Image: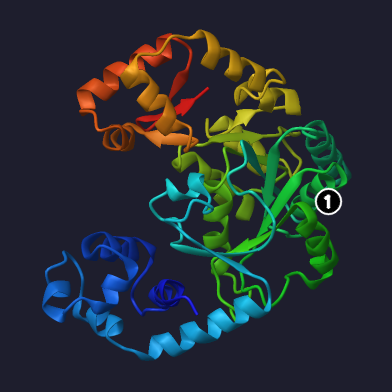
Amino acid sequence: MSQLLLHQIALTMLTDVGDLTAKKLIAYCGGVEAVFSESVNSLRKIPNISSKVIQSIKNQKVFSEAEKEINFIEKNNITPLFYLDKSYPQRLKACNDGPILLYSKGNANFNAERSIAIVGTRQASEYGLEICNEIVSDLGGSDTLIVSGLAYGIDACSHRNAVKNSLSTVGVLGHGLDRIYPSQHRELSEQMMHKGGVLTEFRQGVIPDRQNFPMRNRIVAGMTDATLVIESKARGGSLITAYLAFNYNRDVFAIPGRPKDKNAIGCNNLIKNNVAQLVLSSNDIKKALNWDDNESVNSVQKQLFIDLDENEQKVVDVMSFDTDIQIDKISIDCGLSMSKTAVVLLNLEFKGVVKTLPGKQYRKI
């Protein structure tokens, strides 16, 4: 049994320790195992760490529960993904509230070159399902990861069409991997395993309670380049996902509908409030995200024919590992001052190698 994994899982089981606090503890202590070996006096010196949290860390009972979880994931071929692992969704890692530990089943590449969340109402109309079919089908043949929540309606439609068109697809769950909810989608989830799979932050035994799904939605929004909403009522989980994506500075798209159509109210409001871009087809999405068919060729040509100096090459190399990356992280990873990094990024933008995003983030083109 891996002691590191034991400590990682144990950390997620601590009372009053959420993802933000866990990341703070790891940063201050220098590692996961160090969190549990640190003295009480040292833990007290960490800002905003309460006595309840310290007491929870020193409670050894959590390790027996972590051992049970390890036995479960080993028995069921489940892969744990810690937020410091390379296989962890790097787009999600950039979100402050991203889970420190995920559990996956299947063979999906969570860091595919392209990824998009497709969400919508559970009571989808024939029109909504048709649009979903067309958009997913048109994305066929590209290295695109389709992410959704394995729910009825638009979610299931996007997964089924991804499977049909040999696209990788991942269902993010609001419960543990000891079940599939809804149970009617068990067969679909099995089909997704061949090129994709399922993903969750919840341990075995966690049932699909209502409060789990907004938590699930932040993973859907955070691990993708963009979120597409196809049909939504005035309120619903797909709107939560859209606003989460918007707050993560990700692209949000919505299919418009007739003003009096109850399934179109949510999408129309997203567009009206400038949260989502109006799109009518996959071509609109590809254009907005620079997913043109010659993207890979253009990328190679840029590497061959654009002259980069030493610092520019450093920045480009760092950006190869992240989709959207903040300037302060670029500065740290490259060992350059913030002012120097800003100048280098500006030059790269002039050369057409990177583009500026909201929130002081940059993306390699």
Please name the residue shown 76% across and 69% down the image. Answer: 182
Percent position of residue 72, x then y: 61, 81
Q: Circle 1 — which element?
A: helix
Q: Is residue 72 above or below residue 145?
A: below
Please name the residue shown 33% across and 76% down the image. Answer: 16
Q: Which residue is mark 1?
A: 160
- Residue 91 shown left or right of residue 163 in the figure: left
Tag 1: amino acid: Arg
Quadrant housing residue 107: bottom right
Query: Dot 1, how many residues are within 10 Å of its Cα: few (below 14), some (14-19), or many (20+)?
Result: many
Q: Is residue 101 above or below residue 155?
A: below
Percent position of residue 230, x then y: 72, 41
Q: How is the image coloured?
A: rainbow
Q: Is residue 209 above or below residue 47?
A: below
Q: Is residue 244 visible?
A: no
Q: Nearer the viewer, residue 262 or 89?
A: 89
Q: Nearer the viewer, residue 124 or 105?
A: 105
Quadrant housing residue 345: top left
- Residue 238 shown left or right of residue 275 in the figure: right
Q: Is residue 265 visible?
A: yes
Percent position of residue 365, x then y: 53, 22
